[in-house]
Image: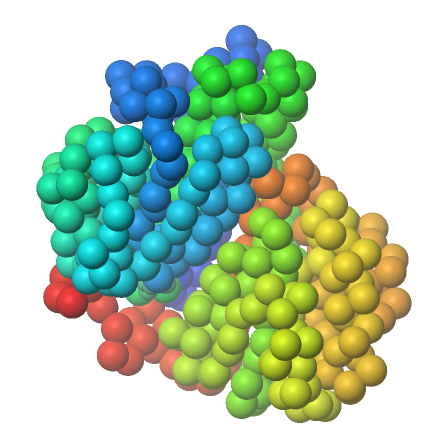
Amino acid sequence: VKGGYEHFMLKEIHEQPDAIKDTYRGRLNAKEGLIRMAGIDDNIEKFLNANRIVIIACGTSWHAGLVAEYIFEDLVRIPVEVEYASEFRYRNPVITENDVVIAISQSGETADTLAAIKLAKSKGAFVFGVCNVVGSTIARETHAGAYTHAGPEIGVASTKAFTTQITVLMLIALKLAKEKGSISKSSFHHHLQELELIPGKVKKALKQDEHIKKIAEIYKDAKNCLYLGRGYNFPVALEGALKLKEISYIHAEGYPAAEMKHGPIALIDEHMPVFVIATKKGHYEKVVSNIEEIKARKGKIIGIVTEGDEAVKGLADHVIEVPETLESLSPLLTTIPLQLLSYHIAVLLNRNVDQPRNLAKSVTVE
Ligand code: M6R
């Protein structure tokens, strides 16, 4: 069942190159410069006339929503808000028929997300679902949607769901941007070509596994960890911290790197491992100066860097390389080493990787 892997989580991490391909297969045609998605094609006016897009989700799916916020605002130039479904449903949100709501859920059964959808519908919004499980409650309750086609995800820790959600949301954003004319022809084509290269690059990122395992051995006894990123990789920092917390039970926090000096920097000492996503295009110089601040306080730096990086390598205690890509696609690569790292730490600590304590795969109660 686990395809020769020791755990479902590891299997699902390694399935990502194929899962991402399955997500865009039949939808993306880079040669002809086309994206076909029935759920969007049939409702294109609703999206293009929307005053704003509100994304609702929980947990890892919420993190994918945050990445989508950057993507949509950048490419489509529509304001986006990302909300925890559990907060949205109880705070009397201002929603009108001019809003488009995108609900993201791997299982399609999350109680809070479902309740938030019902609320948005009652206020007249058009609700679009991004689900993995075909025929799930959320897939049925939404007006239209797009499946991620990631295949079954068994491990409680979400992995391929995250990367395939980002892939679907990127396809949607590109399609809308093209229709709206908010992206140039050449940039549109460039995005499609780069997206098609992602599965191969994820495969390459996965090859760092042995190196990551060694880093896991060094930091497995840490009591606290920090994860930092900026821009598109800020949500990846949140996701990296969540992954570590839920399967290894080590306390971890994700932060936008520049927020460090507003509090968390007080935590830094020689016992604090800090995982910093510092890829080349994403505010690189600024992240490098954040790294210098941490080093000056003796924090341990593990940098997630672009292949061939020199500056971070010179400062960090360890680096893990990922291939170069567009900044907006980089979360699909930078998240891979963080998944592997959490996995190895959890295994070394003898945790129940696929079924961590107190957690369920789908949270069907609030
Ligand atoms: O099935 P959903 O995507 O709606 O689930 C949302 C969260 O419960 C889920 O992502 C959870 O945070 C995962 N265990 C994270 O790995």
Front in this rendered view, residue 181 or 104: 181
Residue 8: where, in percent of width, then height? 35, 60
- Position of residue 99 in the picture relative to residue 208 (left or right): left
Residue nearer the viewer, 347 or 268: 268
Position of residue 200 in the picture relative to residue 109 (left or right): right
Q: Quadrant of the N terminus?
A: bottom left
Residue 105 visible from this viewpoint = no
Instruction: Identify which residue, 272 or 287, lies in the foreground.
Output: 287
Is 309 located above or below residue 180 in the figure? below
Question: From the viewer's perspective, is residue 6 above or below residue 299?
Answer: above
In the image, what residue occupies the spot 32% across and 18% down? 45
Residue 286 seen in render: yes
Outermost top residue: 32
The percent position of residue 69, horizontal first and vertical second, equals 47, 44
Report the front residue among 14 and 135: 135
- Residue shown at 19%/62% (left/top)? 90
Q: Residue, x 63% and y 76% (percent of image)?
A: 262
Residue depicted at x 81% and y 66%: 289
Q: Quadrant of ligand 1?
A: bottom left
Indicate the position of residue 260 as horizontal and vertical percent values.
65, 74
Q: Quadrant of the C terminus?
A: bottom left
Drawn side of residue 94 relative to residue 4, left or right: left
- Image coords of residue 194 (percent x, y): 62, 30
